[in-house]
Every structure is written in structure tokens, then in C-alpha cells.
Image (cartoon, rainbow, N blue to C red):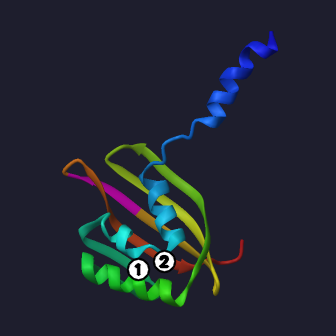
Amino acid sequence: MKLLYLPFLVIFYVIPTAAGPIEKVAELIRQGNVSELSKMFAANVEISMQSDDNVYSKVQAGLILDKFFSQNKPISVKIFHKVNSNPKYQFAVIILNTQKGPFRITYTLKDTDGTLVLIELRIEPEKGR
């Protein structure tokens, strides 16, 4: 009887689950892929980094992230927390490990004209837990 369920378990684990927008952003951050990440930016993006907190255009936000990734080469990323119960508003906290140490990155995605766009990005050094 137990073998009857085995094919369903195999199919469940073999078929990849579709990655949502939170996972897509996390993967682009892990890759340090600013050009693809900037395609997900809203027209204006709020970026907080160290003591600087400002709203930037897509192009300016891309330049700021490009500078961050050139100084902090990504190694790995782990999704620490995510809120995706509302399809029009999603939020995530990830831990980005870089060559210079870990960073806590929080980001917010909001539905704009049927597309989830990145409206806020906060990068801060990860404090020891």
C-alpha cells in the first residue's frame, strides 16, 4: 500500500515549483545582476543604505546598486522572512553573504498596472544573532 503513494511523492519532488517574485529578486541579488534587477524597479525606488535614505530614479538606483555590488561581491543569499499572502504587495528579508561580510536586505514589491515592481530596498550590515 505504501508503494502506491511513491509515484506521487517522486512527482512532487521532481517537478520544480515556480519561483515567485520574491525568490526572483533574491536570486538576482545573489548574482549581483543589477541590469536584470533594475528591470523590476518602479519609476522611483526608495533605497536606504548605511545612513543614506533617499528616493531615486530607476537609473540612479541601478548605479547605486552597481557600486554596492562592485564593493561587496555576493556569495550566497538566504530568504530569512517573506510576506506574500497579498498578491498586490509583497515583502521579504534576506541575508546576503558577501566577501566583506553579511548584509540584511529588505525589499518591498507592489503591484503597479498588473506588474509587481520593486519600490523599496534597504541594505544594512547584518548584526550578529
Residue extending farthest top: 1
Amino acid marked by disc 1: Ser
> How many badges with numbers are in the image?
2
- The spot of residue 23 in percent (x, y) is 49, 55
Q: Residues within 10 Å of mark 2 (few under 14, many from 20)?
A: many
What's the residue type where badge 2 is placed?
Ile
Question: Is the Cβ of the residue at disc 1 closer than 8 Å to that at disc 2?
Answer: yes
Q: Is residue 64 at least partly visible in the picture? A: yes
Residue 61 % position (x, y):
32, 80
Gap between marks 1 and 2, in whole Å? 6 Å
The kind of secondary structure element at disc 2 is strand
Q: Identify which residue is drawn at 56% across, 65% down.
A: 94
Of labels 1 and 2, earlier in sequence is: 1
- 80 in the magenta segment: no
What residue do we see at 52% from left, 90% from top? 71
Q: Is residue 57 visible?
A: no
Q: Looking at the rendering, which quadrant does residue 95 occupy?
A: bottom right
Q: Which contiguous range is marked in magenta?
A: 108-112
**Residue 102 x/y as whole percent:** 63, 78
Residue at numbered disc 2: 123
Q: Is residue 69 above or below residue 30?
A: below
For the C terminus, the quadrant is bottom right
User: Does residue 110 show up magenta in the picture?
Assistant: yes
Q: Residues within 10 Å of mark 1 (few under 14, many from 20)?
A: some
Name the one closer to the observer, 97 or 56.
Answer: 97
Q: Main secondary structure of the magenta part?
A: strand
**Tag of residue 48:** 1
Q: Position of residue 49 (x, y in %)?
A: 44, 83
Please give the label number shown on residue 80.
none
